[in-house]
Amino acid sequence: MKIAVIGQSLFGQEVYKELRKEGHTIVGVFTIPDKDGKADPLATEAEKDGVTVFKFPRWRVKGQAIPEVVAQYKATGAELNVMPFCSQFIPMEVIDHPKHGSIIYHPSLLPRHRGASAINWTLIHGDKKGGFTVFWADDGLDTGPILLQRECDVEPNDTVNTIYKRFLFPEGVKGTVDAVRLIAQGKAPRITQPKEGATYECIQKKDNSKIDWNQSAEALHNWIRGNDKVPGAWAEVDGQRVTFYGSTLIDNGTAANGQPLEIPGASRPGIVAKAGLVLFGNDGKALLVKNLQFEDGKMIAAAQYFRSGGNAAVELTEEEKAFAGQMRAVWQSILTNVAQIEDSTDFFKSGAASMDVVRLVEEVKLRASGCQLQNEDVYMNTTFQDFIQMCVRKLRGEDDEEELVVDYVEKNINNMTIKMPHQLFINGEFVDAEGGKTYKTINPTDGTAICDVSLAQISDVDKAVAAAKEAFEEGEWGKMNPRDRGRLIYKLADLMEEHQEELATIESIDSGAVYTLALKTHVGMSIQTFRYFAGWCDKIQGCTIPINQARPNRNLTFTKKEPIGVCAIVIPWNYPLMMLAWKTAACLAAGNTVVLKPAQVTPLTAVKFAELAARAGIPKGVINILPGSGALVGQRLSDHLDVRKLGFTGSTEIGKHIMKSCAVSNVKKVSLELGGKSPLIIFSDCDMDKAVRMGMSSVFFNKGENCIAAGRLFVEETIHDQFVKRVVEEIKKMRIGDPLDRSTDHGPQNHKAHLDKLVEYCQTGVKEGATLVCGGKQVERPGFFFEPTLFTDVQDHMYIAIEESFGPVMIISKFKSGEVDDVLRRANATEYGLASGVFTRDIGKALYVSERLNAGTVFVNTYNKTDVAAPFGGFKQSGFGKDLGQEALNEYLKTKAVTIEY
């Protein structure tokens, strides 16, 4: 068969090799892009064989398949897709395209343990049987029909690594190839997965792997081994986070001799014995842990806990010993004056210089791509022993998080434990506001308080600005190579992706966003934005300019693009994380430092973002987050003399005030994305189905709390009644409810004051004579829910025709057939100019209208289709300046011209 292999890793490589041995033609290998200049093993193997390799960074944008990517895939002519291990989201256009469809390998006995952490949960649940499934891909999450399953016994002390190496890897390769053989023979079954016994568990991460000591010894053992090595089960011991590795169940007699160790929450103290750390369940039975890891990344044998003070090194594996031997040879080649490299040999005391540091870092990258060193790492680990320990920690993924003190508010919600910081973030630390002032942030679903959040005061603003200024002028951020800056921003994006479900849950309970939309758009586009601008860091450049001067004409003039300095960012409440990303990503990519004020009613994803930024290694002072009031914090940022740029998204009224304050204080550079009343013109020759579908989206997307929402629809009179009827039918289908419910279409409005304004807005429309077709009032249930609303017969002079609702209110006006210029006049008769749209099958008409609509964005036969690479911003009283795209960088850069005579 002609097969496309879609995936990555050594597992994917072995499947690929075996398929070729079976005589199949591999028409294409689709894998991940090179990481740090090194290709994935699957790509390396395929390229060696001359097989075409595609390395798409992604297959979809905003949930939609990328046409060019799909076209390249289809051109291969694949008859079957084999997905041995794939971390990317593959669109259904690709899944369903081949003659024989697509098959996927999954390391559990489906339907049990669906999800990305299947092996972890097999162990955590103490399953006696494990195994893998090869199933037919569908549009669900590991829900497709089963083709083949193989099972194995789970040994009592198996870890993720042991069961994978013993069975899931070798037998998984064979099983995947066997599945392809059955397809080729026409004997492959399609067995519907039973509903009984189906489970889906969350991805195991450090934040949700804390040990609950109120369990039996066996349950504790299963939790520890199920999280070994990644992410690592941990608990608080002696006031710090300690991670446990190498658990085994033991007889209680093993614990006879040793020194007690108090562990908060445990049924009784642990015992540090010769064999390791003995722990006890609430059933009195015991388990033994071999190794411990401390918050600083140091690992020790558990038996050495009291003797080492947490500083002894863990014993290296054979593979790590081989790496250490290679690095010892590298040190010897650099330190030629040293007869022999000992563990105590000091790199710099032995004569190494700064260029030797650069070489050493590169030598490590050549031998271990997973060990990403910075020059500072060498300076901080100068002896050979410390250097090797540091490298090994990085290779094990145990050195990812710097020590960061976070006072979390934890909630069990949405089938996960979310951990929310709630303090100000200033100079790399979470701190209380001056005077300990706080306020309550409210869940709009039920009107209850989520938690207390620190309320920033003027003195807090001054501290944050001072920290940002020092970080810019004196800190490593200002001196950092742009490529290294990009690397940190990429890492931040990766951490956001790792925490995307948690971020989306926080966004949902704090802003009322429907969870599925929060995951895809609020969080998903935020991640895309940081990745996009990370790629720009080392591509910001000026130009050379020929100048006309007196002879002899020996002059060189060039321009430099330089960061502005301390930038203030003030964002709204409708897309809390995404608005943060749209401005902050460009700001950081340009090399600035930032003080950001989230909307007072939606602060939680911003302070969670601060935590992730710190864990990504963004230096102290570069990012500062200040929840608080606009009148206090926003005003102080506008007035502050050390702030050189302010980016604002919000109302036109507040934007004008900010612009004035920025001018009076120190003539700050300003960019403003303000209000909108975006017109959408629907002609009679439109695709009616599409116009209705996109018209609904243009108004009701994100509960209407959307800056580019179509504030007014102009519908040609010949299709007006039909369009209205179709819209009413669609409104009736909308499910209003809990935003965390996956079936909900329409969640609560963001906060009570906004809900009240919407009620008043609709009452005004009725008083002025517009026809209220449906909606217009609060939903009778707890929380801040408002009915999707439709007004017709709206005349140009009416309040609702002029002013923005910023809610789920569709405003429809008729226009006469053939009067294109007149409807354009009406559409442009607004002080706003953020976005606009037109639906027509006539390309000439579409171009004519799009040229004449006076708005920063024009959508033709679509709506809400924003992209991180496309500039976004308005005209007139919708503001000026751009977010997104290359143009956004210019908002955070200054241009310097340099002329040299030679």
Image (cartoon, rainbow, N blue to C red):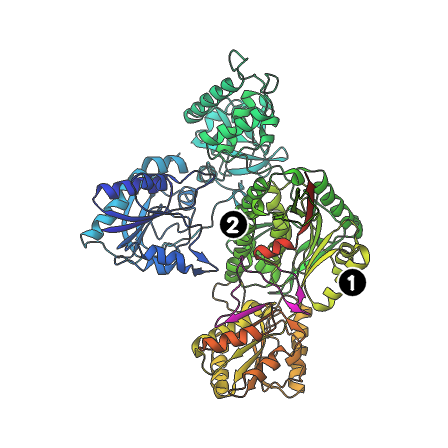
Q: Secondary structure at mark 1?
A: helix
Q: Which residue is mark 1?
A: 660
Looking at the image, can residue 155 be seen? no
* Image height of 829 relative to 593, above or below: below
- Which amino acid does the dot numbered 1 rest on? Lys
Question: Which quadrant holds the C terminus?
Answer: top right
Q: Residue 896 placed where, x, y %? A: 69, 48
Residue at the far top: name it.
Answer: 339
Return the x and y of residue 465 as percentages of the image width and height.
75, 47
The residue nearer to you, when weighing 783 against 837, is 837
Residue 866 part of the magenta segment = yes
Image-based side of 799 in relation to 170, left or right: right
> What's drawn in magenta, residue-wise?
857-882
Is 590 situated above or below 855?
A: above
Q: Look at 54% across and 60% down and name the residue there.
A: 870
Identity of the residue drawn at 41% across and 46% down: 32
